[in-house]
Amino acid sequence: MIPIRLLVSVVIIGVVLLLTVCGYRSLQPTFATNQLQRECDTAVGALTSLADGGVPRDVDDPLAPLGTRRVLSFEIPENCVYLSFGGDPDPQNNGALRPLLLGSGAVIVYRVEGASKQVIWCPGVSWGFRAGSVQGLRPGVTQESFLLQGGGSLRLAFELVRQGDSRFVLVYRSD
């Protein structure tokens, strides 16, 4: 016969382990959201200094020298649903993702599975994000935001460009 003390101890240990696992699972979206927030804050700081002190490339001139460029590495959590530079890919919150621009494109929007959408505005900037599209040897300006889905390690290139009187930071994969 199993002693009552042993049985009670095993049940208590099982309950404590169950509560620990449930607590960890409920905190996972918070950890991922905080990680993405740190990554985005670092990117905004680096890109603001790039835009303030950089030299833009004229995208209408195919012979223009490259604009000031910065390559940043990101560690995106696996439970990231999307990360968008320049727009809100899910304005209706229905899961139908499209690379739509939001305003001038000076915004980063992301969502982690199990958490709400997060929006980081880039206030007081005179530029916006745009997805870079490869046209010949150099990326050109699109009228879309740059949209990433899912997680993992990646490197993104950010290049300062101008088209007419407008300045943009082009975003494209560098890995």
Image (cartoon, helix red, strand yellow):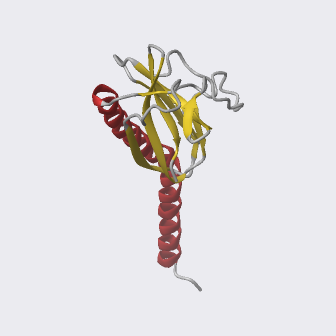
Against 139, residue 94 (above or below) is above
* Residue 145 relative to residue 72: left or right: right
Against 15, residue 58 (above or below) is above
* Residue 96 relative to residue 50: left or right: right
Given residues 169 and 107, the one toward you in this image is 169
Given residues 45 and 90, the one toward you in this image is 45
Residue 155: % across, % down: 47, 50
**x 47%, y 58%: residue:** 20
**x 31%, y 34%: residue:** 45
Residue 117 appears in the picture as rendered: no
Against 119, residue 17 (above or below) is below
Q: How many marks?
A: 0
Residue 173: % across, % down: 54, 46
Residue at the limit of the structure toward the bottom, as seen here: 1
**x 57%, y 42%: residue:** 137
Residue 39: % across, % down: 40, 43
Q: For the N terminus, give its image quadrant.
A: bottom right
**x 61%, y 26%: residue:** 144
